Amino acid sequence: MLQEIKDNISNLFLGCNEEDKIELINEIRFHIHQYSPFKNEPIDFVKWVKSDLVTANDYNPNKVAPPEMELLEISIMNDGYTQPVVTFPLNDKIEVVDGFHRTRVCKESKIVRNRVFGFLPTVIIRKDQSDKNDRIASTIRHNRARGKHQVDAMSEIVLELKNRNWKNERIARELGMDQEEILRLCQITGLQDIFKDDDFSKSWESSDSVTLFDPLTDDLTEEEIEHYRTVNTSDPDRIFHTFDKWECHKAGFYSSKFEGKTQEQCEQAYADFLSDSQKFADALDGVLSEWINSCEHYLTNKAMNRIAWLGQAAMCYATGIPSKYCAGFNRLTQSQQDEANDVALKYLNKWMDKYRRNNVTMEEALSIGRQVNIY
C-alpha cells in the first residue's frame, strides 16, 4: 500500500512546473495534517507561501543590527530555512507573528529568493491565539525566548496591552515578565506617571504610592466597565489625544524627579508659585495658548479635577517642575488655596469661552463626587 501511495504521488507531479508542485505539496501536506496526531501543533503543517503575501506586524519590538542580519542571511544561504515563519492570515495578506527577519532575507537576498522561488515556509498560529492581544504576546514570547527585545519598543507593547484592558498580572504571565519589569518599562517613557491612579485629587495632591493601570481590567464586570465609561469616555464632547501629542508630557509634567532640587524644595516652589496670583495667571495664559492638545485632552474631561491640572500645568510651564511635587499646594493657607482655585477657574472658563463651551462652576471643575480612576 505504501508503494502504491508513492507511485501515485510520483504520477501527480509529472509535467508540473515549480509553482504547481509547490501548490500540490501544500495540498497533500494539508490533507495529511488533518489526520495527524500532532495536528494541534503548528509545526505539523508547514506551508510554502509567496513572500510577497507576507507582511510585517506593527508591534514587533525585536530589532536586528546590520551585522546580525548579514549573519542571518549567511546562515540561511548555507543551512537553508531551518525554522518556519510563524504567521496569522489577515484579510488578503499574511501577517508575521515571529520570523520577520527571516522573511526579510527571502525578500531582499537574491540568492535566497531564487533558491526558494520567492516562497517562505510558514506555520499558522493556533486559532485560540488569533486575537491581536494574543498575537502581540506570542511575538514577545518568541523574542524573549531568544533573549532579544528592544526596551523602548517593549514599553510601547505594554501600553498597547494596557489600552486593551490587560491587567499587570496578565501581562506578566503572558509575556514572562515580573511586576517590577512592567513598572520599569513604563517608567522608561513616563507611562507610570501618565496613567497612575488618582492623578488629580481635590487637594491637588498625588500619592507616590500607586498601583499602575489597575482600575479597568478584565476582572471587572461589563456593568462596572460601562459605569466607568458613562462618566468618562462616552462623553460626546470629550476630545482625546494620545500621550505623544501632549505638550505637557514633552515639557516634563510627568517626570519622576527634578534635577537640582530636593522634594522639599520642589514642594516649596509650588507653594511660592501658586501664592503669586499674577505669576500663576501669566503661566496659565501660556498653557492655554501653547499647550493646545494637552488642554483639549484634559479640559474636556469632566470626570477629573481640571482645576488641579491647570495648577500643575502652569507650574510645569513656568518652572519645569513636574506634577509629582504638587503636594506643595497644601503648604498654602486656606485663603491662598481658595485664591489659587479662583484663578484656575477663571482661566478654565476663558478656555471654555474661546471654544464656545459652557462655563463651569467650581464644583464641576473640581469634579467633586465624580472622581474616577480611568480616562
Image (spheres, rainbow, N blue to C red):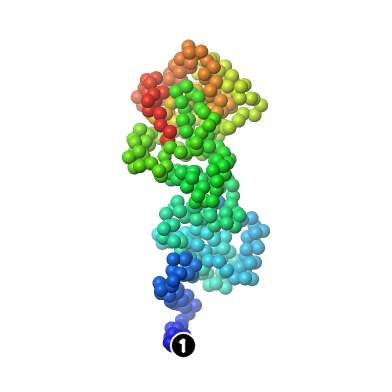
- The answer, for residue 152, to whether it is visible in the render is yes
The amino acid sitting under disc 1 is Gln
Give the image quarter of residue 83.
Answer: bottom right
Q: What SS does tag 1 mark?
A: helix
- The answer, for residue 288, to whether it is visible in the render is no
Q: Which residue is at 57% across, 54% downward?
A: 144
Give the image quarter of residue 126.
Answer: bottom left
Q: Which residue is at 49% across, 47% downward?
A: 171
Spot occupied by residue 263 in the image (x, y as percentages of width and height): 61, 25
Q: How many marks?
A: 1
Left or right: where does residue 94 sit relative to residue 270?
A: left
Q: Which residue is at 35% across, 33% downward?
A: 231
Q: Which residue is at 55% across, 20% downward?
A: 328
Nearer to the camera, 36 or 296: 36
- Compared with 222, 99 (above or below) is below
- Compared with 333, 364 (above or below) is below
Nearer to the camera, 89 or 180: 180
Crowding around mark 1 (Cα neighbors within 10 Å: few <14, some 14 to 19, many 20+) is few
- Compared with 271, 256 (above or below) is below
Spot occupied by residue 348 in the image (x, y as percentages of width and height): 43, 23
Spot occupied by residue 167 in the image (x, y as percentages of width and height): 46, 44
Spot occupied by residue 294 in the image (x, y as percentages of width and height): 47, 32
Left or right: where does residue 238 sit relative to residue 82?
A: left
Q: Which residue is mark 1?
A: 3
- Compared with 51, 3 (above or below) is below
Picture quarter with the C terminus: top left
Picture quarter with the N terminus: bottom left
